[in-house]
Image: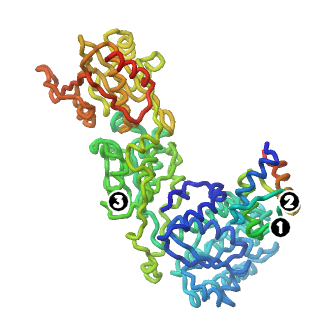
Amino acid sequence: MPCVKVDDLSSDQLLMQRRKLFLEFSARTDLRAVRIAVLGGSTTSSLVEVLEVLLLALGFRPVFYESEYGRFYEEAVHDPETLIAFKPEIIYVHTSCLNVPRLHAGTTEDDAAAHFQRQADRFRAIWDSLESKVGAQIIQNNFELPPYALFGNMDASAVSGQTRHLMRLNEFLAQEANRRSSLLIQDVHSLSSHLGLANWFDWDRYYSYKIQVRPQATVALARSLAAIVGAIYGKTRKVLVLDLDNTLWGGVIGDDGVENIKIGRETPMGEAYTGFQEYCMALRERGVLLAVCSKNSEEIARSGFYHPSSVLKLDHFSCFKANWFPKHQNIEEIAKELNLGLDSLVFVDDNPAERAIVAAQLPSVAVPNVGTEVSQFAAILDAARYFEPAGVSREDIQRASLYTANSQRSQQQSQFATYDEFLDSLNMTAEIEPFKQVYLERIAQLTNKSNQYNLTTRRYTLAELQALAASQEYICLYGILRDTFGDNGLISVLVGHQEERTLWIDLWLMSCRVLKRDMEHAMLDALVHHAQTRRLTVIRGVYLPTKKNAMVADHYERLGFIRIAAPFDAVEGATYWSLVLDGYFKRNRHIKTNTAQLDLDGVLQHV
Amino acid sequence: MYSPELILIELQPIFHDALKLPDLIITRSSSALNTPNWDSLAHISIIEMVETHFKIRIGLSELEDLKQVGDLVDLIAEKAS
């Protein structure tokens, strides 16, 4: 797949960049040729131009034939020689409501039936001829509703109403598609409704060049068509990989506990998550596989699906990855376990940083920008047409022969060679300072709710924290992290007390939102700086295990602390750690901190 | 507000793409008659991109009055904000 993802481009961007994209994509050498004939009831050149770019992006090298203007019927039925010689694999019959004659006021029910029959026969004749003389996959679009409702609301019910007539024709098209293996319907009725007919028809373009829709509608038509072509050749995605916290339920289950996650009908937010779970469930019912990829401990992650309001249950997932490894590694594992290519996967996560690294490391995985509002997730996924079914899995279509083997899929280079490079690309800056009054409430809140990245899980009231901040015996630091995606807010807290030349760490916690960002290193650097300013020589810490904080069992070890013996009265399972400050080197390599200058002072003082 | 000079500058890449001539320089007096590759398909692309880029709609009668690039520049200057 190319570096530029056309899925991520707006219609306007696609229109403006199509030439550049065409040149970029068509330079590839691993494209599969596909021959497409377009029989149009209007000018199709603009549509073909955009479709070409989209198909190139999907890995096809399309060759097009376009009928003479408006001769979709004649070329199919009367003089198909050129079409036969072109040897198309796919024939797209692009007609619109403007190609269907209008009924006149005063038409009787019998006249209307005869009129309908004539239209039906006309389209049957087209498909019959294409089937018998050309033999290709036919894509026929159904009809948008008419631009004018001459009879007002009655246009949908009156005998001569064009709205009613077109809806009848659409039902006829559906029946024919179910009867004929060679016929697929492109649902322009729905497509134009999504855009709105007011944004669909473009009379200036129609009278000028006989293109009847707005440029943005042309892009929508091309996208939907590209999805069908992709589906015909098996390029449909098959797995929906889902994050958990704030994606399938509201809240952080490791911190809040299963009883406090937002899901169910009781609150608006809970309903929104339930709604998204129902959408995922509906996809599963029609054959899309579901998988979980979450930064959580496995046991806690699984517990969420025992919540009585959870629509999704554990056995709905074909693969379940909940651990602390980077998500792109887990997603590769998921693909391997399901024996599918990475280009079969769609990844949904509310966290833009997680999306960015997966998109960068695994360019074949579709990573839609779903934003952070769960109420929008389903609509965004739906519009992208990732799971377009080739409702054509019938033997009589030579799909097998058309199908390109997965093994030929081009391997693409990751955008970032290493995780370090990715971290640098985030342009992270941290503010690490002694407690400030304005932040105390947030510090108290974080202190009392963090369970996972929390070494001691000690709770403090606001007043206690205030007292600690004022005490000379204590070093109390908070950390705020900002990156290219925005401000993560106050996400880390460190409290230590002095005993002679030793600093004992009473509290060290961090929000899981910023895991594996190097933030704990930046916090340690700052702590060491403050300890050295006070001429302290050793920092000691303790890990008190709980049901939820297994992820930090090796926290001190990873930071270079040495394990020391636990005192005789220590809690069972607690481990004790020590770091000698002489010769300390800065640990953080990826975050710019406001303590950089202080660090220098610290070093000088130390020397 | 767009100045005519700025509009002419921003039109260059649009014409490069539509006419598939990356080195072409478009002036106010360029027209379909004196510019290579400016056929009806290219014209459709030019208007599509102009409408999209400058966020304007060009009406049928306005379209009819466009004889050369200078006319287009003036029309954009009038319509674009």
Residue A370 drawn above or below residue A113 = above
Q: Residue at x 47, y 37 (%)?
A: A427
- Residue A102 position, x and y percent, is 77, 74
Sequence order check: which comes first, mark 2 or mark 1? Answer: 2
In-front residue for pair A215/A297:
A215
- Residue tagged by mark 3? A335
The answer to whether dots 3 and 1 both sit on one chain is: no
Q: Does the residue at mark 2 contact the one at mark 1 (Cβ under 8 Å)?
A: yes
Q: Kindly identify the residue that appears in the image at 29 percent across and 42 percent down.
A: A297
Are the two marked residues, 3 and 2, in contact with CB atoms closer than 8 angstroms? no
Element on which disc 1 rests:
loop
Quickly name the residue at label 1: B34
- Estimate the spatial distance between the alpha carbons at disc 2 and disc 1, rounded to whole Å: 9 Å
In the rendering, which numbered label is found on residue B29? 2
Mark-to-mark CA distance, 3 and 2: 58 Å
Give the spatial CA distance, label 3 vs label 1: 56 Å
The kind of residue tagged 2 is Ser
Q: Quadrant of residue A363?
A: bottom left
What's under tag 1, amino acid-wise? Asn
Name the front one of labels 3 and 2: 2
Q: Amino acid at mark 3?
A: Ala
Tell me if mark 2 has few (under 14), some (14-19) or many (20+) residues whose alpha carbon lies within 10 angstroms of its own: few
- Whether the residues at callouts 3 and 1 have beta carbons within 8 Å, the answer is no
Q: Secondary structure at mark 3?
A: helix
Of helix, strand and loop, which one carries label 2?
loop
Label 1 neighbour load within 10 Å: few <14, some 14-19, many 20+: few
Q: Which mark, by number, is residue A362?
A: none
**A192 or A83, nearer to the observer:** A83
Task: Tell me if residue A446 comes above or below residue A350 in the rendering.
Answer: above
Left or right: residue A60 versus residue A102 is left
